[in-house]
Amino acid sequence: MPRIYMNEWPPYAPPNLASKECSLIAAKLMFNAAQTAPVTGGVDQVEGELVYGMEELEEVARKMEELAYKLKNKKMEDQWKYEAVMVRQSDVILFLGNYRAKETPFDLSCGLCGGRPDCSHVYSRRRVAAGQIDITDRSLCKTAIDGPLCGVRVGDLGHSVGSALWMATKLFVDCRPSLTMGIAGQKLGYCRNSAIVVGLPISTTSKNPYVDIHPDYHVVNMEKLIDSVRKSYIIPRQAGPDYRLWRLPREREEEKEEE
Amino acid sequence: MIIGAEETKKAAYEDLVSVAKHIVQAIYHAPQITGAIDIKTAIVTGEELQPAIDLMKVMGEVEMVPWMDYQTYQMAMDEGTPPVVLFIGADLTKSRNVLNCGACGFETCAKFNRYSSENYGFGMGSFGPSCMINILDFGIACDWACAAAHQYNIESRIHVSVGMTGVLLGYLEDVSYVLGLSLGPLKEFWYYNRPVFTKMWNKEFHQQFWFPLNRTLFPVMFQSFSGEMNAFIKTYDKWWEKDKQDYVKVVEDPEINALRAGLMTKVMEAVPEKRAQLEALKEKRKAEGAK
């Protein structure tokens, strides 16, 4: 049996990768939990996709930063950027989407979406042919999420997300539900059959990266601080002497010399 | 001290209320995407549950799922072990976040909120229109309730049907949508492999109710050769021995239309009486408490 050394620092070094692989297993188990969540009528409607690896996560983070400005929503801009940092600090993201919310509503006439005893709120705002929702023209979407959606299906996605989160707590991995990550992931083609996707970033570090977030987190965070030390310390050290010719006498050595 | 067989069962049953309280703790600890919804809960059991069951019966005269749930709850009541129902509700009709995500069908949360105020109404199970992200957060919380119940290894199931009574009869106030998580009775199965149906199921019921229902709901499953202009729909077992075959036809059915159209009127007509019953029970409890 080979020895497997694990350590969270430095990120993406072999000891950290060994730890990240465990997060990946946790994410897979979380998907299983999501799949078994209680959903209305027991109808299959959830799809999942995992994003693992530095490059892949960076792509999601950059998409979020792009959307932070592109959506022109000043009140949300910071949240998009802060959560992009969290993506970079994550081991893996589990995307969960509901592939029925847009195309095949529950048809219950429950009133959740429109407050009426029918499903007209959704159907009347969609292209419809033969009583079915026609999703082929995807250019119609002008918002981050292509609504309106079926409320029952969205609630069921909540149940699945809940079970995935519950499994995360059981496995002692840190995780939070994020809609910004979900939207970015969906735009990148993850869970491509779903109009609504939630991102569940997973991390196994000493400090939960998804809580205790201060203002301007996108420019002041652990990675930026470390980089700041890297760029700053380089300069003053150049004023040092030749270590081969001069060494700092230690306290006890000085005492001995005096004796 | 010895607590005997009957007493332990009784104590365990009575403690379902404590379990419900622990589940409430999990609900409030559930991670939300926005953290913006205000969840309300109520624990109901005993005779206070009867108005809810009666209302499900009214709905069950037309719809199958409330009928199933009515039968299931009533049997528990009749056996003297009513479930402990944890009502979980929230007002989902106002978007308190600023995401402008569009999941509701509107470009901005402000436009949705305006529309929601002007078009507030009740469907067949909920008030609306609702913010989709509120629904998502509410779903997470309800799932944590289910997961918490599961951790206690007790029979449980979350229902839209009993939840609807929670809104209409005022078990919870100032909420637009309620789900009901039923805990107990202390059996391996109560809401799955339902004993109430096991009891009523026999060959006659199967042939007169279940099989015709299947033929109505899934005619393609029982269809003969599809190259016919009028493919017949098989009857039970020896379908080839039948003199005259059955066919599927799409028709207008004024009787069913009237039943469906009148359902919510009937439900709403029953609400004041059931509400009054519930209020009377609340007063009775209050008086008992005062004594």
Image (cartoon, rainbow, N blue to C red):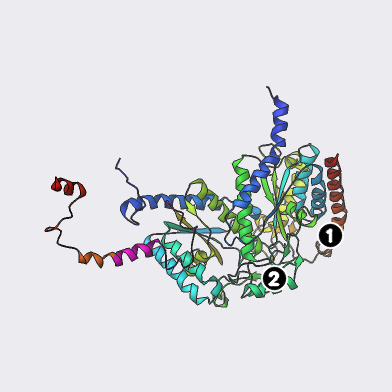
Residue at the extreme top of the image, as rendered: B1
For residue B230, which quarter of the picture?
bottom right
Query: Chain letter of disc 1?
Result: B
Q: Measuring from the top left, give residue A120's x and y in whole percent.
A: 71, 70
Give the extent of the magenta segment: A206-232
Question: Real-space Cα distance between discs 2 and 1?
Answer: 22 Å
- Whether tag 2 and tag 1 are in contact, CB under 8 A, the answer is no
> Is B216 inside the magenta-drawn segment?
no
Q: Measuring from the top left, give residue B125's x and y in whole percent.
A: 74, 59
Vertical relation: B261 (above or below) A30: below
Q: Is residue A225 left or right of residue B46?
A: left
Q: Quarter holding the C terminus of chain A?
A: top left
Vertical relation: A73 (above or below) B55: below
Q: In this figure, which residue is indicated by the disc labeled 1?
A: B268
Q: As shown in the figure, which amino acid type bears the numbered disc 1?
A: Met
Q: Measuring from the top left, give residue A56's x and y in whole percent.
A: 40, 64
Query: Chain letter of disc 2?
Result: A
Q: Quarter holding the N terminus of chain A?
A: top left
Q: Is residue A257 left or right of residue A230?
A: left
In percent of the image, x 59 and y 42: which residue is there? B151
A133 or A11: nearer the eye? A11
In percent of the image, x 75 and y 68: which residue is there? B120
Q: The residue tagged with tag 1: helix, strand or loop?
A: helix
A235 or A141: nearer the eye? A235
In percent of the image, x 57 and y 74: which residue is there? A143
Q: Are marks 2 and 1 on the same chain?
A: no
Q: In this figure, which residue is indicated by the disc labeled 2?
A: A121
Q: As shown in the figure, which amino acid type bears the numbered disc 2?
A: His
> Is A214 inside the magenta-drawn segment?
yes
Q: The residue tagged with tag 2: helix, strand or loop?
A: helix
Disc tally is 2
The answer to whether residue A218 is seen in the rendering is yes
